[in-house]
Amino acid sequence: IVMTQSPATLSVSPGERATLSCRASQSVSSNLAWYQQKPGQAPRLLIYGASTRATGIPARFSGSGSGTEFTLTISSLQSEDFALYYCQHFNNWPLTFGGGTKVEIK
Amino acid sequence: EVQLVESGGGLIQPGGSLRLSCGASGFTVRSNYMSWVRQAPGKGLEWVSVIYSGANTYYAESVKGRFTISRDNSKNTLILQMNSLRAEDTAIYYCAAHSTGYFYFDFWGQGALVTVSS
């Protein structure tokens, strides 16, 4: 399954809303996760099951979608949210990730 | 608190072998599904291999036949034996856990850099 993320780069001002997209080449049901990665750090789980926030993740992060189309929304960007974001399906083997969306300061 | 700590990375010549370890604390490796995920310099994430709690294993096509995932239960450690290394295997290798039994990664190590170069 090929995971395609768009856009590759998203320029957003602090306090604004960011909407990131992830598309699967075939249905993955709700078996979709989102991760945040900052430079020099390991990825951190944000969302699993397409819409469930992981432990300790702020409510400004939300996920939606099912089947082949998914969205990660950050409602009001904070300085610590500028990072790379990856989606990943876990519907079957092999597990695959999208190419990532970089959220940068506008 | 769950901690995963990788070790064993380094510089290795093409065709060589390397063994990565991932020590766990606050977490029992043998009771959980565990994976290795890698990230080439400046690139995205690539799943490499998984081991089930029952010891079934799966591999990405890119490493099948060259890499072996295993556990050392006495040391609560995940292992990745990498043979016949190629330049394209150069990456940061992360160990990651699937503690809920679903195959998203909820705990990650800090990563170990493997560089394959002559």
Image: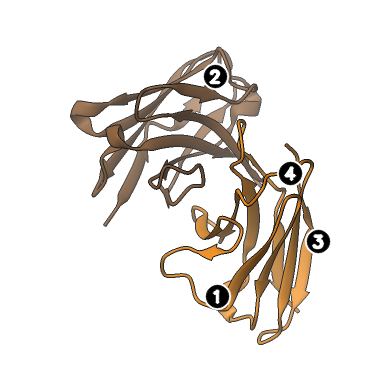
Chain colours: A orange, B brown
> Can marks 1 and 3 be said to lie on one chain?
yes
Circle number at residue A27:
4
Q: Is residue A103 above or below residue B28?
A: below
Are the residues tagged 1 and 3 within 8 Å (C-beta)?
no
For the residues labelled 4 and 1, the Cα–Cα distance comes to: 32 Å
Tell me the residue at 72%/83% (across/down).
A13
Across and down, in percent, residue B81 comes to: 43, 20
- Chain letter of disc 3 in the image: A
Q: Amino acid at mark 3?
A: Pro
- In the displayed structure, would residue B67 be above or below residue B34? above
Sequence-wise, the earlier of marks 3 and 4 is: 3
Q: CA distance from mark 4 to mark 2?
A: 41 Å
At numbered mark 1, what does the secondary structure look like: helix, strand or loop?
A: helix
Q: Are marks 3 and 4 in contact (CB under 8 Å)?
A: no
**Quadrant where the C terminus of chain B lies?**
top right
Label 1, label 3: how far apart the Cα atoms are: 20 Å
Q: Quadrant of the N terminus of chain B?
A: bottom left
Q: Which residue is mark 1?
A: A80
Asked if marks 2 and 3 touch (Cβ < 8 Å), the reply is: no
C-alpha distance separating marks 1 and 2: 39 Å
Vertical order, A23 against A57 (above or below)? above
Q: Secondary structure at mark 3?
A: loop
Name the side, left or right, on which A9 lies relative to B69: right
Name the chain letter of the residue that bears numbered label 1. A
Number of other residues with Cα within 10 Å of mark 1, as a class: few under 14, some 14 to 19, many 20 or more: few
Q: Secondary structure at mark 4?
A: loop
Residue at 61% x, 37% y is: A95
